[in-house]
Image (cartoon, rainbow, N blue to C red):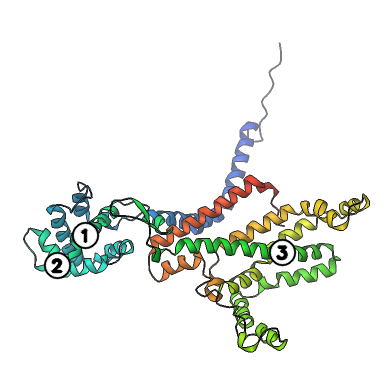
Amino acid sequence: MAQQIKQLTTVDGIPLKISLRRAERTKKIKALLLIAPTFLFIVISFLVPIANMFVRSAYIPEVNQLMPKTVASLETWDGTGLPEEPSYAAMVEELKLLDKQKKLGKIALRLNNEKSGMRSLLFTSARKIKKIDTGPFKGKLIEINKRWKDRETWAVIKRFGKSFNLTYYLSSFDMKYNVDGDVIKQPVTQRIYITIWLRTLKVSLLVTIICLFLGFPVSYLLSTLPLKISNLLMICVLLPFWTSLLVRITSWIVLLQKEGVINDILVWLNIVADENRIRMIYNLTGTLVAMSQILLPFIILPLYSVMKTIDPSYVRAARNLGANPFWAFVHVYLPQTLPGIGAGGILVFILALGYYITPALVGGSSGLLIGNFIALHMQKTLNWGLAAAMGAVLLLGVLAIYWLYNRLVGIENMKLG
């Protein structure tokens, strides 16, 4: 008969397995408590604003909440002809109430963003219907303003009666709903955002190429020089990070303007005539030059970190086997730098997509990017829904680029230093 194995216990008599589980649970709780402040900071300062942006881009509750009777009466309207008398009666009643409660401006602003003239229509009608007490209201409302017999006016109100819709997303791509609810393009004179999106992609791609073209030889030089010299040059690369962004941009304004340093040197060297000075600021050229200089360190550092780990004996071996310096570089050295090229390239491209300050200061009207228009709608036009929709599209675009990079190259091959 086998002897029963005595259960191991701690000094206080608790079974050892239970004691170990409690100790592990205590460690996990302590670890969670240590990361809780960081996690809360990320949630409050990052995830919550992003969620709020997505909600604002599609959630438009003002008309539904403040004009419930009008919205309910329009549910039976099929969109052809004009609504029936109950819709006009509900509109008169709620216009009076909203004007009395000082809430008409909220609805007027939302509707005016979709159809120009809606704000003046609602406010002028609200002032004039105070003396209207009896129906029929349809004829009297049309007599106050002829736009009340415009079918599109009522179509806009009915569309915004739904709390969720994609109006702002369509507007961010120069599209809209017509009176029948079909998606159509904006008039040619009002199509601006597609051009801005394409310009943003173009500038981001050009800045990435310029930074790669300039950063690759610098990174190669840093990785091959003796440590004392390369450390000194690395300080020069990092020096812009310790300088105010506004100071650097102002310096470029001084350098690039028509009466600036660069033009003065070109005139002094007789390369250009004094009356034909080159315009390099407040246009797309200024945006490209300033952004490339500002973002250049973001591609040098990943490239340098990769090049520093490449064994120079590989290139020497290729040379010994008969390859000339060019082919040894192309076939042996360059493929090993691809992780740094990919990491630095995607980093610069994504940063350039959302750039705002530099284009605003040196871009002029032809160098503004999508970030500048998002700020415009946030600060001046107060069309926060359209700004949120543009921001959401930009974020989704960045995530799509990140996903594509992962599919083609692999995130595990990315090296940032």
Q: Is 140 left, or right, of 337 in this rendering?
A: left
Count every numbered label the image shows and give the total: 3
Q: Quadrant of the C terminus?
A: bottom right
Q: Earlier in the sequence, mark 2 or mark 1?
A: 2
Most distant residue in the right direction: 320
Mark 1: give few (<14), some (14-19) or many (20+) Cα within 10 Å.
some
Q: Is 374 left, or right, of 210 in this rendering?
A: left
Q: Residue at x 69, y 21 (%)?
A: 5
Q: Nearer the viewer, residue 256 or 7?
A: 256
Write down the residue under mark 2. Answer: 144
Q: Nearer the viewer, mark 1 or mark 3?
A: 1
Distance between the alpha carbons at the discs numbered 2 and 1: 13 Å
Most distant residue in the top direction: 1
Distance between the alpha carbons at the discs numbered 3 and 2: 66 Å
Q: Is 46 left, or right, of 152 in this rendering?
A: right
Q: Residue at x 58, y 65 (%)?
A: 203
